[in-house]
Every structure is written in C-alpha cells, then in structure tokens.
Amino acid sequence: MKKIICLVLALAMCVCLFACGGKKADSDLEYIKEKGTLVVGITNFAPMDYPDENGEWIGFDADMARAFAAYLGVEVQFVEIDWDNKVLEINNKSIDCVWNGMTLRPEVTEAMDCSVPYCNNAQVVVVNSAVADQYQTKEDLAGLIFAVEAGSAGEDAVKEMGNEYTAVLTQADALMNVAAGTADACIIDLLMAGAMIGEGTSYPDLTYTVSLTSEEYGVGFRKGSDVVAEFNKFYADAFKDGKVEEIAIVYGVQESIVG
C-alpha cells in the first residue's frame, strides 16, 4: 500500500513539474528574458533599419527596438533576413520579432500576432525623373516592367496591376534595378522613398509618382506570444512621454507615427 501511495505521489509531482515547466515554456516573454536577448528580424530599409558608416544598425525601427529591449531588461540583436522567409524565421525561433516597416496585410496578421499600428505608409511607384511626367496615373503604368521586394506589399500591388515584374531580395535592390535601367520602375514604401530618392540622396535621378495603397506598419511576433501585450504597453507609454516622437524626428518620420 505504501508503495502505491509513493508511486501516486511521485506521479503527481511529475505532473505538477511538467505543468509548471510547460507553463514557463509557453511564455514567450520569459523565453526572451531568460536568454537575455531580443532578436529582431530586419532588412536594409532606410529610414527604418539601415547600417551606419560603422555597420551599426540605426533607423526609427532600430532605435525603437533598442528602447523596447531596454524596457524588457535584455540586449537587442539585429538579424538581416530574407523578407520572403520572415514567417519561417519567427516560427523556428531564429528571430523573436519582425520589426522592419512591416505592412499589416492579412497574410501577415494571419501568420503572426501583431502589435498595434505605429506608423502610416503607402506603396509608391518610383521611376526615373526624366520620364516621370509620363507616369502620373495608375493607367499610365500599363506595360512597365517592375522590380519589387519578394514577399512585400509592393509585390502584392504589382500582382494586382498585372504588370511583368522581377522579385528581388530588398527594396534597396529594387531601387538599384531602376537606377541601372534593368527595370522601368519599382514599388517601394513611401517612407523609404522619402529617405532614399531625390536631390541630396543616393538616387538623385529617381522620383516617385503614383501612390497605389495606404497602409499601416506593425511589429510581428510569434502566434500566441505574450510579448505583444508587453510591446503595446511599452509603445503607449513611449508615445505618451514623447519618446516615440523624439526618435521619429531624428529620422524624419514624425508625420507618419500613430499612437
């Protein structure tokens, strides 16, 4: 009888330990805090995430990610990802979140749990300034060959238009294709266009014409992640105390932030 009681107690303890262990493992927040790092998936996308002259990642999203990591009491680590594989990267825990001017499209919000929107944006058509007057409406774009980032809102837009296109790794690559003449046009985020093209930029001969969509940015986390609620609280507090605007002004995106 004593053996049976001991066996039952032992089993009960195992169940209890398993339940506690399972509960702990289910907390994404505890997982991040225990390893001491918030791993952020990004691409080279000014003014949100881009390397400075020393190779350090800066930008509105990068600086906000540093602030959030500090709020959680962990270090931040940036990992440049293939944007088309962002869901795979977050699901296999190569990264903890996707924070890179990510448009809150249905395929994104279905695959990840996402934060509140923090920034307004649009998808715009970029062409050479010399021919910009020819492409002022959506109808004018018929027949153009585009370059777009694979898996982006820009790719969705060009598919909807039915134009021929080449999918490239990043929006920066899409701009390079237009500058090199290997694409007639590209579709990129308005915030990137404001930072990367026109007088005084790396692409002074490019300009944007047609705005195709309006959209919002959010941060993507794993499905069921309790970090989402933690981020939303952090962002609300940071917006209220002026921290969000302070960082936004540095990168010229203060007119686009929402709170």
Image (cartoon, rainbow, N blue to C red):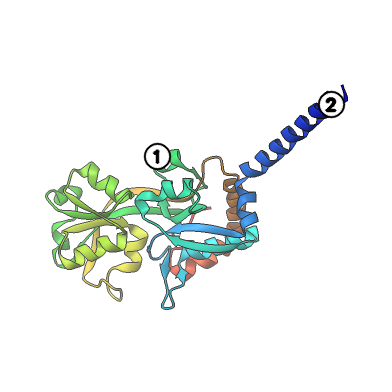
Disc 1 crowd rating (10 Å Cα; few below 14, some 14-19, many 20+) is few
Outermost residue on the bottom side: it is: 53
Residue name at image x 16 percent, y 56 percent: 135
Which element type, helix, strand or loop, lies under badge 2?
Answer: helix
Earlier residue among tags 2 and 1: 2
Q: Look at the image and tell me whether residue 192 can be seen.
A: yes
* Residue 142 drawn at (x, y percent): 13, 48
Query: Pointer 2: what residue?
Result: 3
Q: Look at the image and tell me whether residue 242 can be seen.
A: no
Image quadrant where residue 161 sits? top left
**Who is closer to the viewer here, 129 or 5?**
5
* Residue 242 drawn at (x, y percent): 59, 63
What residue type is disc 1 on? Pro
What residue type is disc 2 on? Lys
* Residue 115 drawn at (x, y percent): 52, 47
**Who is closer to the viewer here, 19 or 66?**
19
Outermost residue on the right side: it is: 2
Which element type, helix, strand or loop, lies under badge 1?
Answer: helix
Outermost residue on the top side: it is: 1
Q: Is residue 148 above or below residue 4?
A: below
Residue name at image x 41 percent, y 52 percent: 102
Query: Pointer 1: what residue?
Result: 106
Q: Is residue 251 above or below residue 154?
A: below
Q: Quadrant of the N terminus?
A: top right
